Structure formats: structure tokens, C-alpha cells
Amino acid sequence: MEARLKPVRSISTMPHSSLAAMNDPSPAPPIRRSGRWVLIAIALVCVLPLLAALYFRFIAPPDASTLAGQALTPAAFPYAAVRRMDGQPLAHAEVAEHWMVVHAGSGLCDSGCRDALYLTRQARTAQGRSMERIQRVWIIADAARPAADLLALHPDLLLLEPVDGRAIEAFAGAGAIHLVDRRGFVVFRYAPTVDPQAFIRELGKLVKF
């Protein structure tokens, strides 16, 4: 007996729901969607500090009388003018995810220097989870090397020395503390006489961006 061939249904006779399923593009795989969110998150991390700086500078500048420090015209931190104590250069990429709290002065570190280092340590610790966003920096402006017992009190300090002394002159003024944002711009200067609590509060607000 001849086998009966089953009739082939033409596309035109297929149910509408089947045609829609064939024409409807499949959704993006989960991995692809996840990758998009990662790229968006990276873009936001890079852009937010810039947007915050523009906002506070041009749209809603803070009242100077309420600031603990002196707001500066943003200037690039001189990465090429400093190096690590072992002679290795410091690249912005190494600290790009951090706000840098910078103190500069003699390696002998007098009482004013010790007070500044203590304040920056306390201010960083006071930020709780946000403390990981802060990198403390001590630029040792001369040939003197800090005492071991002093360094033991500040294990998180990044020690730098100048390659070009003229490029760091602005940082070495009378024990001041400078703040460098995540873009690598020097944005605030704090006098040695700054109120510790005001400094801690202001730092806490800034590092959120």
C-alpha cells in the first residue's frame, strides 16, 4: 500500500499566534543585559563627580561662610612631579577611585605635621564604609625620613617624594591639607587651624560623589 503523505500546512494557514512567535525577535540573553548594566554603572561612576563639581560650582555654589575649607579653582594634581618612596611613579589610575587627602612637609614632622596626620586619620575613620573611598597622602618635601614609630601610627598613608619641588610648592604651605577629587583635581584647601568636626563633616559630604 502506498503511504499516505500528510498534507503540509502552508504558512498562510498557520495560526496567527504561531506567525507572531516566528517573527518576534527573542529577548536579549541575560548575560548581554547584565553587560549593559555594568557599562551603565561604570559610566555613572565616571560622570557623577564631574556633574557634582559642575553643579556646586555653577548652579548651586555653597555659601563660602559655611565651608570648613577654601574652595579652589580645580587644578590637576601633579602626578608626574611626585613618586613613591621606592622611586616608582604614581599614576592617576592607581588612585582614580579615591579622594586624596594630601599633606606635605618635612619628613621630620613637627607637632603641626603630627596634628595634620592625626586629623586626616580621624576624618577617614569617621566615614565608616565610605572610608575606603579616601586615600591619605603624605608628600615628604625634603630628604628627612619619618620616624618608624610615627609611620606605625599611620599604616594606610601613601608616602610620596617630589621629583619636581616647584610643582608641589602649593601643597607645602604651613601645614595645610588639600583635597583631590576622583578626577584628579585639587578642589579644597584646609588650614591647619580648621575645626576638626567641621572638616570631618565636610569630607563626609564630598566623598559621597
Image: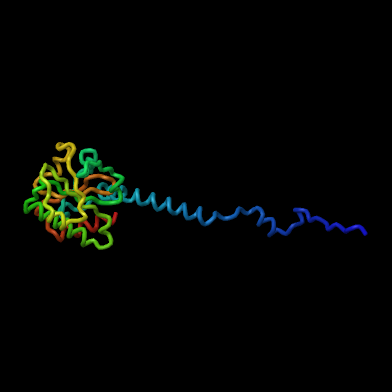
Tell me where residue 68 sits by quadrant. bottom left
Residue 75 visible in the picture: no
**In the picture shown, does residue 178 fall above or below 195?**
above
Tell me if 149 is positioned left or right of 91 in this view: left
Tell me if 11 is positioned left or right of 148 in this view: right
**In the picture shown, does residue 209 fall above or below 77?**
below
Residue plotted at (6% across, 51% down) = 110
Tell me if 122 is positioned left or right of 48 in this view: left
Measured from the top left, where is residue 97 in percent x and y?
A: 30, 51
Measured from the top left, where is residue 190 in percent x and y?
A: 14, 51
Measured from the top left, where is residue 82 in percent x and y?
A: 20, 41
Residue 74 visible in the picture: yes
- Between 196 and 152, the one lying in front of the other is 152
Q: How many labels were placed on the picture?
A: 0
Q: Residue furthest right?
A: 1
- Between 68 and 7, the one lying in front of the other is 7
Measured from the top left, where is residue 24 in percent x and y?
A: 63, 54
